[in-house]
Amino acid sequence: MITTNYLVIGSGIAGLTFSVKMAEKFSNKKIVIITKTSEDESNTKYAQGGVAIVLNDEKDSFKKHIQDTLIAGDGLCNKEVVEMVIKEGPKRFKELIVWGANFDLDTSGNFDLGKEGGHSEYRVAHHKDVTGAEIERALLARAHKLKNITILPHHFAIDLVTNHHLIDKNPKENVCYGAYIFNQKTETIFTIKADSTLLASGGIGRVYGHTTNPVIATGDGVAMAYRAKAKIKDMEFIQFHPTALYEPEGESSFLISEAVRGFGAYLRNKKGNRFMLDYDDRAELASRDIVSQSIDNELKKTGDTHVFLDCTHLDINTFKKHFPNIYQKCKENHIAIETDWIPVVPASHYLCGGIEVNMDGKTSVNNLFACGECTRTGLHGANRLASNSLLEALVYAHNIFKYLSTHDCEAIEIDIPNWNDDGTSIAKEHVLIQHNLRQLQALMRDYVGIVRSNNRLKKAIKHLDLIYNEIEDFYKKSKITTPLCELRNMINVAHLIISQSINRKENKGGYYNIDNNQN
Ligand code: FAD
Ligand code: SIN
């Protein structure tokens, strides 16, 4: 067993920002970060567009950014949260720069700000088209300098330790005491006991198979919090990014940043029509929910598998400077963007809901905090405004740091039983995991996609029950493996998405059910 002051699950922007702040201010506090693959692998690493932030006071204003966020969220944002995040944003962004993250400047030495869907102004600070990789690099470098931070890569959090694991249960309140951790290299399970635990475990994209997210995005934090009886909200609001590169065989889809449309690219159908003009006055720069739903409609009308992003009219030299990674990836796929249109299709991208937290990042379980994509803060409402996610993680990591700086969670003297795997054996049937994973992803894609219906949701929940029963049974009998735990978590997440979709009777933002009345 390891004992620490703070256990942080996840080494993306949320977990690292909190850890760096805490470790710098309190050299006597110990922080253990566990992360399930290499320390930099995360959704953060793949962020392209940038951080939405009001830096240009002449043209932009907090009021405009707040307004754009509220419009994108379609009436379901918490206005107080929106105002807090957007006003705090610039301070938190400047800390990133102090920590060594580089952002592009224009020829006058000001930040070179990009534009994305739903933004009324140029306000997206970026590092070429690899902003997330630059932020991750800078945060890890800073964390490595701090002696009171220990990072444990290839360690997988299986479950939070809460009252129901204890021998002497405390029936009055639900408290988190740390987590059970699986060391993937030694294949052993141990306990980390912590005064406070922070879930910073990221998104859920893999539940859909076809996603812009890397393979780590299996919703583990949301599932663990759900099993620990934390409140989980707004799971029906899955954001589909309109422009993932169309790769017929591929599952993980390379993203073509929305900033490319901000730079002037057009969406066209196979016939060459700029169809977005028929759907929204903002055309290609309408918010993401509208663009994805419009593409879905075009594809259903035409029977085509994808639409196209046309950059052929753009200044190619400037394009290459701003989007070198996208340019290169297209080239590798034999797409010369000077002359060819890029085939694109929507893919699951971001979870707008998640573990419910208040403005201090507190969940409904005592001593359990959450930050970043795994949370539902109220900022995004029914649809996240582009590039508001990195911003949200920075601001909430700071809020949690501030709260814990003044409200020390007391070390709890309690005996935590070791992980008990009596009666389990090494699973021989790995095919069962693969088979059920494919079934789950197909089910979510076909029945719980951009456009839903009551009938399809009912079918989905029935089918999911069968997968759930098979895997729960398998889990009870088997020794822990990462793929098994991830599948179990994805099943929990799928259940939350489908059941909360069934409960939503009004279409809002990214949620569209053909049986609901139009709003
Ligand atoms: P992550 O960065 O995903 O980190 C999660 C961490 O938790 C990882 O280290 C993971 O290994 C670890 N973890 C998960 N489960 C476990 C477990 N069971 N045990 C141990 N460790 C675990 N947002 C923007 O604002 N601007 C953008 O330009 C932008 N572009 C994007 C482009 C792409 C392709 C993608 C996929 C997302 C983009 N986003 C963007 C969204 C944004 O990147 C993410 O929402 C944000 O980075 C999430 O940060 P996080 O720290 O919450 O989670
Ligand atoms: C993108 O660059 O299009 C992604 C931005 C985001 O998800 O916020």
Image (spheres, rainbow, N blue to C red):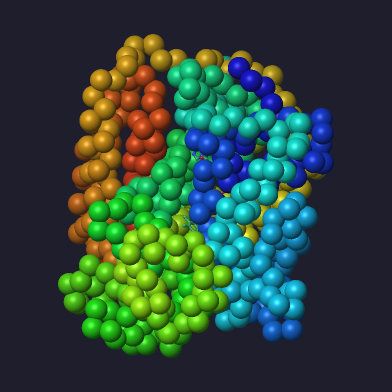
Q: Is residue 222 left or right of residue 367?
A: left
Indicate the position of residue 81 as horizontal and vertical percent values.
Answer: 64, 63
Indicate the position of residue 302 as horizontal and vertical percent values.
Answer: 19, 76
Quadrant of the drawing holding the C terminus: bottom left
Q: Is residue 66 visible?
A: no
Q: Is residue 339 left or right of residue 103?
A: left
Up the image or down, 384 lies above or below 178; here it is below
Q: Quadrant of residue 292?
A: bottom left
Q: Residue at x 59, y 59 (%)?
A: 131
Q: Nearer the viewer, residue 123 or 178?
A: 123
Q: Residue at x 80, y 41 (%)?
A: 24
Q: Residue at x 36, y 32 (%)?
A: 483
Tally the numbered discs: 0
Q: Is residue 472 left or right of residue 418?
A: left
Quadrant of the drawing holding the N terminus: top right
Up the image or down, 193 lies above or below 225; here it is above
Given the current orientation, which residue lies at the most extreme left position? 303
Q: Quadrant of residue 430?
A: top left
Q: Is residue 178 left or right of residue 249?
A: right
Q: Nearer the viewer, residue 507 or 301?
A: 301
Up the image or down, 139 lies above or below 86; here it is above
Indicate the position of residue 404 as horizontal and vertical percent values.
Answer: 74, 41
Indicate the position of residue 250 as horizontal and vertical percent values.
Answer: 29, 53
Q: Residue at x 56, y 42 (%)?
A: 40
Q: Is residue 342 visible?
A: yes
